[in-house]
Structure formats: structure tokens, C-alpha cells
Amino acid sequence: MSLFWIVIRELAEIQAMATSKKVITRVDWEKKLNDVKVRKEDMNKLVMNFLVTEGYVEAAEKFRLESGTEPDIDLATITDRMAVKKAVQSGNVEDAIEKVNDLNPEILDTNPQLFFHLQQQRMIELIRNGKVEAALEFAQEELAPRGEENQGFLEELERTVALLAFEDVTNCPVGELLDISQRLKTASEVNAAILTSQSHEKDPKLPSLLKMLIWVQNQLDEKASYPRIIDLSTAALEDPAV
Amino acid sequence: MSEATSQSEIPAKDLIGDYFLDLWCHTSKTLALKPEPGPESELDDDDEELPSALDTLNSSGGFSVVGPDKLSLLYPNVNLHGHDVGVVQANRHAPLKRLLYYFEIYVKNAGAKGQIAIGFTTSAFKVRRQPGWEANSCGYHGDDGLLYRGHGKGETFGPTYTTGDTVGGGINYATQEFFFTKNGVLVGSVYKDVKGSVFPTVAVHSQNEEVTVNFGQDPFVFDLKAYEAEQRAKQQVKIDNISIPQDASYGIVRSYLQHYGYEETLKLLDIAGKSTVPPISLVSENGVIEEDNMYALNQRRALRQLIKSGKIDETFSTLRKCYPQIIEDDTSAICFLLHCQKFIELVRDGKLEEAVLYGRSEFDKFKKSSAYDDLVKDCAALLAYDQPSKSSVGYLLGESQRDLVADAVNAIILSTNPNVKDASLCMHSSLERLIRQVTACFLEKRSLNGDQGEAFRLSRILKSGKKG
């Protein structure tokens, strides 16, 4: 090892001592990493859980064959769930509501907020398509009675009706309702509700694992200086800053 | 730097081969210890001996009497002084390597004055004083409901307790708090300012006071499981609030499929990824890694399928044709893995005689190390059982053993990519590297925290959220 590196390392150690942080070198850290045994089956399960929860049904089916990992849910139910999600995403809300009720009528019965959001989305789609009269009728008949039950619904309803008041809806204060992101929001809400009704978690486990990594690294940073993973996509170890 | 040069002197394929042999040894040893792994059983270094009884040796003799069951405590005499406390610690300190520790007492008789206390003390504690009165101790007292921490003056804490009450004391290592309960209801918690390991401690201090202790041998009155779930959820909220790039998980899954050669799944995921709204950006920021991951994908998939369907002869011939350098040394670790698998497949097919002949002709050359010996013994042991799949070496007939061999072959092919400079990148997918990092960080964090708290368990994450 060159003198240069020795000096650099000593400097790092002195600095760390000043802040009373423990310094763990890359070599030592790699030894610790090597002591961790990760079971392949467990990684496969994480991947399967991601495919299933995110609704990649064909990929999940193939992964079952290629890796021998059993999915934690009946794959047929994913197809139905994805059909509902897709219907909302493409603006066919009526169709989506029908499909959810075919799947399990209790989902909407027990989830008034979701049902309201779907109805609201339906009205947004009517306005988008320039069907002003139909939209107004729908608001009075379907949405208003629900707004009376719930203050939050009422505010949402008023925001939606406001869309009719503007000539240039894309530039009005409530224009975001017409944005594609509003559809995605509703779609993801209905997706989560279906998963919950199937006793399945609504979020995949992999993102929480990644969050946990960032959390524990931040915690450990207070007490030690060690090689970290900063870029999640490469999972490359980066040497501690000197 | 010196470490780098010394590593590169060992050929990548030997490094990789040895790594997978080591993994196999690890499986073999873990299963030898626990021959029938239930769903709960996992390699667990965190098994600590728990407090199970009251310590009869280190108790304040004369003032209190520990019952023959070592779980009850009686104060038979009239107390004369403040120092005549009958204090007893548990026989062991509270375990450290977990989220929570908890125990309960039942007040059978509050005696003359009801001066009963429950708390925690260190091994240096003077067992003539109430827990909480001395430095490095903490106690919840029955006669005044006060909490004592390190001196004789208590602080307002909770209700008093008396005959017929069940009182509990616990430690939350994540929040570094002591907590106390009365009749199944949480009374409160305080910062745990006591360093080092602590002993569950009980005290009686007036005539006829009698308590029994429950170290978990009986069900607790307090719903510890619900409390634990609540505490976990609190911590989870903090973790959930951390933001990560939206398609990070998608990228890691893709890279996983590429790494292990799950080519068909990858294709379907890519097709689905393109049609999602909005489309997930498929352009990886790190093109080099993407390219390395795709190296020989098709052949890696084909070889994995061969091994997974038990076709070891075909595996050898494909390797001979496409990657002769991998198996040119017939005494290498990868050849050992493949020969063993061939032997295992013969046993699976019931061709025992053929297996014996194959073993005799192939295993002899692997006498390099004791690791090889042990693994050969595992394989040979298959022959000894009428129903080998139910024996202690039954794991060899499982899918995970085939997977191990397939993973080894996969990694070695990845290492033949001339662009690859670091063999460790061939051994582990990015997902595995992330999991190793999380686990190591949790362990290091705990060791810097006086060994307190629980380790990271992937299996807990996998189990979480499942009903029933």
C-alpha cells in the first residue's frame, strides 16, 4: 500500500475519532456482508410478490415456471384486478364499477370513499367528453346525495362541478382533475381496495425493503462510517467519505 | 491497492465455485442442527437464555422467602428498617437481542403496607434496597404508584396496586424505554437510562406481602403481541415516509431476472412495462450494468432449465461445447457441484447401483479439503435410507439444491464475460446485495448499541401482512 493511502486512511481515522464514529473499512465491511446468507427462495418470493401485487400476471405465471416459486395469491384474480385498473385508467369508469361488483360487491358497499371517488371520476370523464348536461344530471342524482352525508365528499363535489364553470378547463384552478394523474390515483385506490378484499397487502414488499435500507443506513451513519449503498439501481458499495 | 491485487490472483471461477460450495456447506450444517426445518425455524444466532425463575442465591436473605417453585416471594416478618427490603432478581438478565422483553407479577397479598415494587436492576444492584432507589435501577411501586429512577424520590407515574392486581414490567429496545402495565393496561413508559443488561426485579417490604412471578411460563394478562405490533407499526410509519425513486423496485426486479437468467419472465415483464400508463422508463441509467446483466442470457436460461430438470449429462455437454474453460479442470468446485448433482439425480431416479458406480469413479479426485469430504458424505448418506427424501440429507433432493447448482453455473458463465472485473458482481444479484447491506447495517447498529434490539429478518418481511 502506498504511503499516500496510509496517510489518507489515518486522516480518516483521526477525523472519525473526533466525532467518535467507528470506522469500518471496506475490507472489514465486506467480511460482514459475506457472513449474511440470503436464501434464494426468499429472494424469489420477494420478486413474485412484486409481480403479483403490481399486476404483472403473465410475468408472474412465467416466473412460477422458471423459478418454481408459488405465488401468494390465485393468479386468476390478478387478471380481474388488472382489468378493473385498466378500465379506470382508460376512462371507462362505469365498466370498472361493474367489474368490481362482479368480483365482490362488498368492496364498494363497505368502502363509501372509494365508491364516491369512482363516481367523481365518472363525472370528470363526462365533462372531459363535453357532455355537460349528462354531467350535471349525474352530479345532482348520484353525487349530491352522498355529499350531504359527508363534508369531505361535498367539497370534492364542488371542486368537480367547478370544472363546468371554466371555458378553458386545462388552465383553470381545478384543471388537475382532468389530468391523467387523477385517473391513476383513482385506479390505484381501486386496485388497493381489491387487494385488501383478497386479504393481500396492497403494496409490494420490495419498496419497503428499500426504504428500510435507507432508514437503517441513516441510523448507522450517526455511529459509524462504513461503505454505503447510495444508488439503489446498481446496489454498488460506495466508500465512506473521507 | 493490495487487497485488490491479492484477490485478482485467484481466478474468478474458483472464487465463485468456492462461494457456492460454502453456501452448500452452510445449508448442510444448518439442517444437521435442525433436521426438520419448520416454517418458523431459521438460522438464529439470537437465541438467548431467558429469565425463568427467581435467583435464590443473590437475594436479600432473611427478609424474604422465595417459594420452592422459585416463582413466588413472601415477606414473613415485620420490617424494622428501610434497608430491610426483600429484593429478588431473576436468575438471568433480560434478553437483549429482541424488540421487547416483558414479565409480570401477581400480588397475592399486599400485606401490612403494600410496599411492593416491580422493576429492573443491574447485576451490581444492592439487594437491600427497593428497585429505583439506587442508581442504575428503575421501579414502579405499589404503595404510592410512583416511578423511581435512581434515587429515593419518585415521580408521578400511575395508579397504586394491591392484592389481586397483576403488574408487568417491560423493556422496549427500539425506543430505549421501560414500560409498565397494570391488569393488562399500559400504565406508561419512561426513558431507559440504565446502561448494560438488566435483571427483572421484584421487591416486598412489609409483613405478609406475597407475589408470584410470571416469566412467560403462563399467558400474560397484558396483550404483549398487540403491543409489539403497535410498536412495530410506529417504527414502520417512519420508514414508510422515506421516499425512493418510483421505479427503483421495477429496476431491481428486472436486474434480478437478468442476473439469474429468468429470460422468459423478463420478456413478459418488459412487454407489460411498456404498456403501463405511464410507461416505466426502460432505459437504465447505468447501461454498462444492464449490458453485463444481459450477457449470455439465453444460454444461462437454457442451462438453468437443464439443471432444474435434472439433466446433468446434457449440462456437461452444453458447457463443453460453449464454455469449455469452465469445466476443463475436472477437480474444480463447479465440476464437483455438477458431479454431486448427477449422483443425486441418479438416487432420485432410484438408480442406486449406477449412483454407487458413478460416485466411485467421480468423487475420488475431490480430496482437496474437508468441505468436499463432508459434502460427499452427505451425498453418500442418501444411499443409506429407505426414504432418502425424509432423511437428514433429504434437502439434497429438494429443488433448492438444483437451484444452487444452477446458480453456480449461472455465476461462472457471467464471469466469463471479458468486461467483468469484479467476480463478486457475478455471484450476487443487486437484490441480494441490497438485502446483505440491510442485514449487515442492522447487525452493526445493534452491536454499537450494546447488543440491544432485534436483527433484520427477511422472513419476517415475507410473512408480514399475511392473515392466518
Image: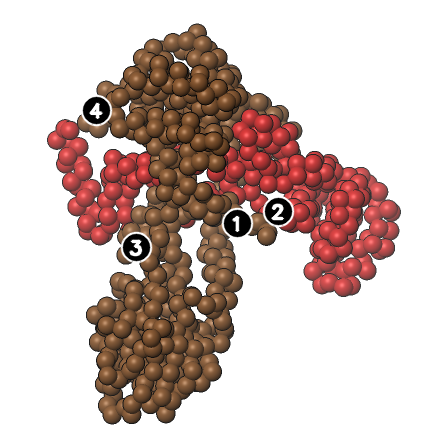
Are both tags, 3 and 1, on one chain? yes
Q: Which amino acid does label 3 sit on?
A: Asp
Nearest to the observer: residue A23 or residue B358: B358
- Tell me which numbered mark, 3 or 1, is placed earlier along the sequence: 3
Mark drawn on residue B434: none
Mark drawn on residue B451: 3
Residue at 28 percent of width and 78 percent of height: B87
| Label 3 Cα crowd, 10 Å radius (few <14 / some 14-19 / many 20+) | some
| Label 3 secondary element | loop
| Residue located beneath label 1 in the image | B464
Question: Which coloring applies here?
Answer: by chain
How far apart in space, not on screen, are marks 2 and 4 (Cα)? 49 Å
| Label 1 secondary element | loop
Chain B, chosen colour in render: brown
Chain containing the residue with disc 2: A
Kindly tell me whether residue B342 is visible in this rendering: no
* Quarter residue B111 falls in: bottom left
Residue at 42 percent of width and 66 percent of height: B216
Residue sitting farthest toward the left: A3
How far apart in space, not on screen, are marks 3 and 1 (Cα)? 25 Å
Are both tags, 2 and 3, on one chain? no
Chain containing the residue with disc 4: B
Q: Which amino acid does label 2 sit on?
A: His
Chain containing the residue with disc 3: B
Whether label 4 touches label 1, CB < 8 Å: no
- Tell me which numbered mark, 4 or 1, is placed earlier along the sequence: 4
| Residue located beneath label 2 in the image | A200
Chain A, chosen colour in render: red
How far apart in space, not on screen, are marks 2 and 3 (Cα)? 35 Å
| Label 4 secondary element | helix
- Tell me which numbered mark, 3 or 4, is placed earlier along the sequence: 4
